[in-house]
Amino acid sequence: MLRELPSQTAGPYVHIGLLPAVAGIPFEPERDWGTMVGPGVRGERIRIEGTVFDGVGAPVKDAVLELWQPDAAGRFPGHDPGADPAFKGFGRVAADLSTGLFAFETVKPGRVPYPDGRWQAPHATLLIFARGINIHLHTRIYFEDEAAANAEDPVLALIEQPERRRTLLARRELRDGRVVYRFDVKIQGPEETVFFDV
Amino acid sequence: MMDNAPRAFRPRDRAWHPPAHFPDYKTSVYRSPRLPLVSLTATRSELTGPIFGHSTIRATDNDLLVNGRVDGDPIGPRMILFGRVLDEEGRPVPNVLIEIWQANAAGRYRHVNDSYLAPLDPNFWGVGRTLSEPDGSYRFRTIRPGPYPWRNRVNDWRPAHIHISLWGAALCQRLITQIYFEGDPLLPLCPIYNSIPDPAARERLVARLDMGESLPHDTLAWRFDIVLRGPRQTFFENRPEGA
């Protein structure tokens, strides 16, 4: 049996490889990795935005984040028949180099089953890469206005302290008539975000 | 459209990977979780992942000698980086999105945040991308990157390295790591390389000179084989991943 390669930090210049335009390189000027929706996308269009904070509360301005989620009906593009062709499922963005704010343009995800057949609450998976992060951080974004679904979610139930489940809830707000979910990540501290080992 | 996603993966051996908190790499101290990770049996959210087709890739994307060219060849030792992508069962993994980035031959990155005094190369971007072939093979042409100093301890230098990002078939195979070069005297001094606890694991990140693939009077070749997490055999039909 072989073993997978060990991880190493993505480093401070991760943008060159994953989002060249952010580094100032015109490798693929036409590409927008942060907009996961196309014309006619089905479901509720949302923006997910937030900031990753380090252990002293400073924004992680050099992070790159990846999002993977099903479409509004709970189908994964490329995997499930009938998945919305106007939805990519995958997004990749950089934190703003001067403020640390990140944002994805996506849809509210549908529910997908847990292996035992129960339903999971709507969620998106978020991966975080940055200098100082030796192996990427893996978390989930749930939605605070899905209280009933969240209460029966088998993954949230794995978190021993109910108080910590709150760290995975994105807060809904309306801004100029658009739905924005705020999701901040705290790598350490009293509000440390729940990270998963899968 | 068929769902080819595997149904289960071997657990990730966290002791094989660097710990999140590794004080010799100072930034990791405040960018590492303090609480235990919550262990999760993979669901469809982790067993699926984005599918990158050939439309993602253009012809010169894996040729760093050419893709950033303005008015001449980039400066530095020309090199071929090649190898195969396998899973933990030794099966080739096709259609893996492989993205690389690196400093130029002088150790300088083309990045708004790199202020090292070494010169930029006007003909070199240091970014490349490819998909693994049906037999798992991949290939890049580039120049050998230079070492460079970094702000950690007073006199820390990174050994020459190429960053590599891998997207296999499933989110739980996601991996970013770094490729080093056989014989580099800076390797034993590097806290990032040494953040990997097991010397056998560290060795896996070292590319080997391969004279058989080297082109006489043209380019030296370095072999680097990639292994991604494997599906758990008992739950997985006997066919190559992605087939």
Image (cartoon, rainbow, N blue to C red):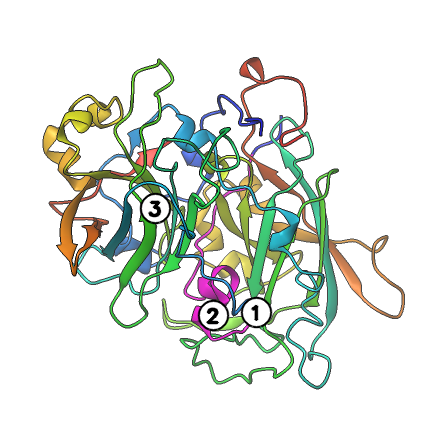
Is the residue B99 above or below the residue B199 in the image? below
Q: Is residue B121 magenta?
A: no
Q: Main secondary structure of the magenta part?
A: loop
Choose between B125 and A183: the one closer to the eye. Answer: A183
Residue, far right: B216
Q: Are marks 1 and 2 on the same chain?
A: yes
User: Where is mark 3, residue-wise?
Assistant: B20
User: Where is mark 2, residue-wise?
Assistant: A21
Q: At numbered mark 2, what does the secondary structure look like: helix, strand or loop?
A: helix
Nearest to viewer (mark 3 / mark 2): 2
User: Where is mark 1, residue-wise?
Assistant: A27
Q: Position of residue B26 (x, y in %)?
A: 32, 60
The residue segment tinted magenta is A4-27
Q: Residue drawn at (44%, 39%), measured in percent from left and top?
A: A84
Is the residue B228 above or below the residue B102 in the image? above
What residue type is disc 2 on? Ala
Choose between A185 and A120: the one closer to the eye. Answer: A120
What residue type is disc 3 on? Ala
What's the CA distance linking mark 1 and mark 2? 7 Å
Q: At numbered mark 3, what does the secondary structure look like: helix, strand or loop?
A: loop
Residue, far front: A40
Q: Residues within 10 Å of mark 3 (few under 14, many from 20)?
A: many
Q: Position of residue A39 (x, y in %)?
A: 42, 52
